[in-house]
Image (cartoon, grey):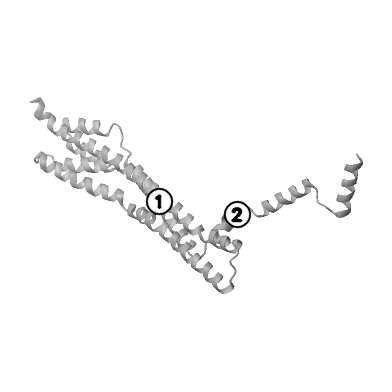
Amino acid sequence: MLLSGLVTVLQDSLLIPKADTVATAANAVAADQHIQLLDLLMKGGVLMIPLGILSLIAVFVFVERYITIAKAGRIEENFMPMIRDHITGGNIQAARSLSKNTANPAARMIDKGIQRIGKPIENIERSMENVGKLEIYKMEKNLVVLAIIAGIAPMFGFLGTIAGMIQTFFNISITSDITLGTIAGGIYVKMITSATGLIIGIVAYICYSFLNAQIDKVVNKMEASSAEFIDILQEPAKTM
């Protein structure tokens, strides 16, 4: 008891910080050193501007293409049965009106086929195939932008890091300050552009692959509708 009281008196007289005081101070310092994301991005330098522009373009292209492709893939379940009923019933004009007023690639292919009724099946298939190619091209429009962003965004990031490293070592050569804090501080700041570029590139590539997969689904629906239409045209020959 006497010894512990003496230690307490010495701590108070010599102003020696207690363990809990030291821990509190350490926590406060750690809290002050937390890096805010926005502040971190601002430290990336000038090349963060084109990276930001690339990210905005990627988001715009993805949203615009996704909406367009999603609309193209919406085919009513009763569309082909109604086309079948009109054609087998001899009401070609009603079938043409239905396909013309349905806004999707498959309907436009069917409309072209209806226009060619009476001609050889090979000519009808070729005309529908040409329309299908044009519709696929429309869906793939601007997808190359996402592919380009996926490729060049990491390059911009690496370029920013290399430029920052050159600047850091140039400053070291002038000031002769080669302390670990100076070198580490310069490196982590300059690697921000690399991390940002890689993230943008990865996300752009994922978006590009996702949209291509959605286009493949629409193409499969178009091919199924085209095959069913050709079968409808050949049905009278089968029943004879």
Does 215 sit left or right of 28 as displayed? Answer: left
Residue 20, image x and y in percent?
77, 45
Q: Amino acid at mark 2?
A: Gln
Q: Are marks 1 and 2 in contact (CB under 8 Å)?
A: no
Q: Would you place residue 47 above or below residue 110 in this image?
A: below
Residue 116 sits in quarter: top left
Residue 149, image x and y in percent?
39, 56
Badge 1 or badge 2: first in the primary sequence: 2
- Label 2: state its secondary structure: loop
Q: Quadrant of the N terminus?
A: top right
**Residue at mark 1:** 204
Residue 194, image x and y in percent?
47, 57
Residue at 13 percent across and 29 percent down: it is 235
Residue 239 in view of the camera: yes
Does 140 sit left or right of 170 as displayed? Answer: left
Instruction: Please tell me the numbered disc located at residue 36.
Output: 2
Does 87 sit left or right of 195 as displayed? Answer: left
Q: Quadrant of the C terminus?
A: top left
Q: CA distance from mark 1 to mark 2?
A: 25 Å
Q: Amino acid at mark 1?
A: Ala
